[in-house]
Image: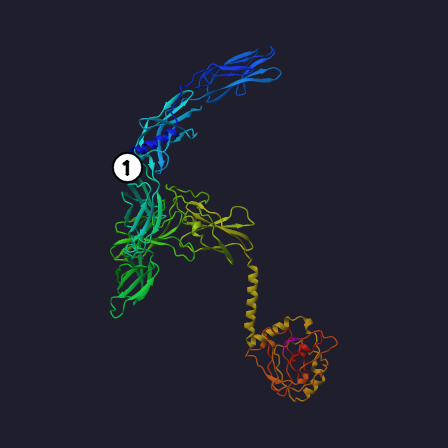
Amino acid sequence: MPFAWIVPSAVWLVLHFTAESCRREAVSGSRAAGVCNKGNVTASTASVIRPGTNVTLSCHLRRTSPSCKAAIYLNDSEQISRHGDSVSKTILVTTYGKHTFMCYNICTKKELVCGIDIECGNPPDEPRNVSCIQNGTRGHPTCTWDKGRATYVCTDYEIELSNGTDSFCFREETSDQVLGSGALSKLDFDSNYTVVVFASNGLGNSSSQPFTFTLVDIVKPHPPRFLVEFDNSSATNCTLSWHDEARAQHYRLRYRPRGGPGAWSTVEIFSREEYHLQGLEPDTDYEFQVSCRILPGRGFWSDWSGSWGRTPTAAPSGILDVWYRQQDLDSGHQNLSIFWKALSKAEAGGRILGYTVTLEALEHGDVPAQSHQSSETRFSRVTPRVAHRVTVTARNSRGSSGPAAILTRPGSPELPPPQRVSAVALGNSSILVSWSPPVGTPLPIEGYLVEWAEPRGEPLLQPRHSCLKLPPSHLSTVITEHIRDNVCYQIHVSALHQDRAGQAAAVRGNSTAQGEPQECPFGGFDGVLSSALTPALCLAAPSAGPQMITMPLASGVLVSWQEIPAAQQRGCITAYLIYLHRRDRQGQPEVHAVPAGNSPLSLHIPDLEPGEHLDLWMTAVTAAGEGPQGNSDSVFLERAGNWVTLVIVCSSFILLACVCSVPPGRKVFQWLLSLLVPQWQSKAIPDPANATWAKSLMATKEELSSPSNLFLPSGFEEPETSPVEESLEHPEPPIPGDKLLVGSAGSRGHGDWAQEEQQLPELYQRLLVEPPELEYISNPGTSALSPGWDTEPEPEPISVFPSAFPTPALCCQGNLTLDRVKLNCGSFPR
């Protein structure tokens, strides 16, 4: 067929026009010399030498005077100088690179005459690892090789390409000192080619071993283009189809869940451009990649081409693992708590929307089963204390899982927790949990349940809960699911008895980022934490301190604080340290250690002296050490004297009120009070009894009785009377119903004090008292005896806090003392 030889011939013709013939000359060994107008420089060696060669330099000047010198310089450093027109010197060259020798004529100034360059280097090594590659079926081949050691001199590299008949050379296209590279002309797929790389410089020549190939062996196809189609009828299957320009016969496909750290799953495919993939996880993002090469076992693989897609949702395929706990409330009721482990991603078939819990009382056949919905992996309900059949199913958008059923048994005794539960950090996001069997359990142990949850990160987010069921022979396990380094987890271990979980034993644990465990010293605490801390794996100290609030008390200070956010704890907090510093004292502050865990987030520091200024701050401690301090606060403790005085005064008033509430006690207190009154308070007060209205009023009464004071002092004298001017500014008729309460102003509301209401004429409702010098007013808040038409005797009331003046008896002659008249304070002129 003519086409079979036309294409190779055309390609080879192109080589004739794009390549050159390979002509390599022998290395020249002539001596180096420099000839200039003013003189010349000659060397005993060639211009390229190897290290350790002695070079004899000669400098000859054509015109000079006897007083001038001829000198030889090496790289601007004088080697020799001599009077005359010539000079020579032998120099040992040991360093690589170019060396410049110059001849100078030194007279009144230094004049350059001539110079030469001599290079010191190595002959070229044999080029190794020759390989050629062509990107795509329509590109140009490129060959590369290793140059070997550096030559330090100019070295030429050429690629000789031969098809067995003719040879063509292609020069190196890069100037790299380590790797050489050169491009060839376009080749055909029907010929065999041989490539040899030649290297040459002034010290020698070398060539590589022949590299023989066909174009199929060096072509690297472009990545294929492909498409992924999912089967809605089956959420675990998909079809991949692709196309490439090389019409390759060998493909490889790899896939994995997108964003996951898992390894790739790889499939090899021959002579097809389509593949049906099965066994994927539903409702999962997958990453797919495809690569190809032209022939199986020959040529280069193309780069990977990538795509991604999400598998559809499928109905849950797994069965939930369910257990329960029960607590008897009384003889007829119990608290039934149901727990279950969430399905794996493959079993869930997609995002679980919720769970359905059905409770059926076995001893009450007439009571229908009750179904409840839950969004969590737990459910609690107070039920009658009877056996129940419990079923739990999970549901997603495509359906529900099969029911998981268990039977609960009432009346079982309390089941004890496992003993000696511990958690040890192993690093690499794992924690070792170990325990001992429970003591005194009444039922056989059918397994163990290990549950763990990370602390709540945000107020509105529930912590992620994980669990693991183990056979009864296992007394330890390594938990890795949902474990992050330097995060404290709450871990619970309980024994299982016929699907019933006993009491749980709790422990806290965390993982570390280090692979090797190491002990962390607690230097600096001086034994304060010996009871609160134990050596553990080396973790990171907390990155923040607790935020505290202080409250001074009578006997000390109450300090309360908040938990450090989980992201800043960096492991399990083992203790909190409260520092207390007294400003007026020298030395270190007091340190109070509070073990972390179940302890309350508060501490009362007692026995502090009043009147002190205190500074307080807090830090948190992990096994790695102490973190930074949180906020600080200052407290001043008040002295107790002010409180004692207030309590004594209040107690005295209360006691006095109690004594005065009894009539005999009031009289005794009034007599004692009169003895303690200063003499200046006995000065006479103007008596309104001499007023005209008082005399007229008293004349209308034939008999007026008044209470006598049994404890009136013998030295007391009747005060003098003073005229009282009647006020007739606004005469108004009396209003029926206006009444005046007789008695002390402070006695209103006390039923044991006698009271009497009498009519008061309008004429005397306002009094204007204008004595020449009014010095004293006796108890202006005391009610006066209102002269009225009812002459019934009135007992003398007394206030809880009586006046300092004793109440004189009302005489039978009609005299009216001022302390028995109620004065309207608004009547006084201002």
Q: Is residue 316 above or below residue 209?
A: below
State the residue in front, 579 or 9: 9
- Pointer 1 local density, CA inside 10 Å: few below 14, some 14–19, many at least 20: few
Residue 326, quarter of the rendered image: bottom left
Residue 675, quarter of the rendered image: bottom right
Residue 735 image position (x, y, % from top left): 63, 86
Residue 418 visible in the snapshot: no
Element at label 1: loop
Secondary structure that dominates the magenta span: loop
Residue 299 colored in magenta in the image:
no
Q: Quadrant of the C terminus?
A: bottom right
Q: Is residue 231 above or below residue 81?
A: below
Point out the stretch of residues depicted in magenta: 778-782
Residue 801 image position (x, y, % from top left): 60, 73
Label 1, on which residue? Answer: 297
Residue 780 colored in magenta in the image:
yes
